[in-house]
Image: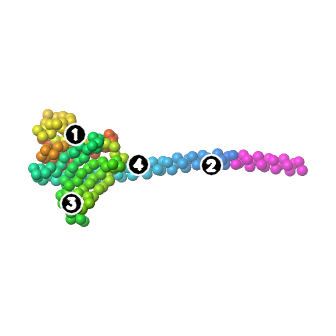
Amino acid sequence: MQNKIKKNNFTLLEVMISLFLITIIITFLFGFFSKIMKLEKNIEEKKIKILAINHTQIRLTQVFSNVYQGDFINKSSFYTQNAKNSKRPILHISYDNKIDSNPNFSLVVRAKLYIDRNKNLCLKTFSRDQDQTPRKEILLKNVEKIEYNFLSNAHQNLKRSKLLEVSKNIYWYHSWPKKAGFLPSTIKIKINNHLDFAFFLPTIHVKL
């Protein structure tokens, strides 16, 4: 009888040890899979950000490569505007939107690149029909700050906007006034101090 009792006690101890080991293994596996899930989430978030950046690059390339080069005398088609928040200036653009499903958004249309109240970098395109609601495209999210730089030859109308001298006759400008009367050859856009875009405009290139 005593032998049977000892055998049962020993079996119970084995069960307790087994449960303890299983608990350790489950805890380890739970931590491992938790890290895998976090890693997958981070990869997915970075993938979304990269896709958004690529989309922004492609969309703005479409806009700037078709920027309107028409009459600057009656109305400026390309200029910056200081917003209430100095870190969020607005860029006004007129560009050729080609053929659109809506005729009022076809050919040359006005647009503006800006940061909205929700910290989204947006491109708002206006219809030629003033009663029609503009189109708002969200290009990037979580944008705190945007900075524009323009490359051009020295010009009387750009004196106040000088930022950096590239050579004797070529400068970077921190803004582009309405009275400029022409287009820059290059625009550089810096977002949140770490994300840079650069675009060439279909205009006369800088002269050395």
- The amino acid type, in three-letter code, at marker 2 is Ile
- The amino acid type, in three-letter code, at marker 1 is His
Residue 130, label in figure: 3
What's the magenta region? 1-19
Mark earlier in primary sequence (3, 2): 2
Indicate which label's residue lies in the foreground, 4 or 3: 3
Q: Secondary structure at mark 1?
A: loop
- The amino acid type, in three-letter code, at marker 3 is Gln
Q: Residue at x 45, y 48 (%)?
A: 42
Q: Secondary structure at mark 3?
A: loop
Q: Residue at x 15, y 39 (%)?
A: 158
Q: Is residue 7 magenta?
A: yes
Q: Residue at x 21, y 65 (%)?
A: 103
Residue pointed to by mark 2? 26
Q: Secondary structure at mark 4?
A: helix
Q: Nearer the viewer, residue 72 or 193?
A: 72
Residue pointed to by mark 4? 46
Residue 108, label in figure: none
- How far apart are the alpha carbons under marks 1 and 2? 59 Å
Indicate which label's residue lies in the foreground, 1 or 2: 1
Quadrant including the C terminus: top left
Q: Position of residue 128 (x, y in %)?
A: 19, 60
- How far apart are the alpha carbons under marks 4 and 1? 30 Å
Q: Position of residue 47 (x, y in %)?
A: 40, 51
Which residue is at the far left?
73
- The amino acid type, in three-letter code, at marker 4 is Lys
Disc 4 to disc 3: CB gap under 8 Å: no
Residue 174, label in figure: 1
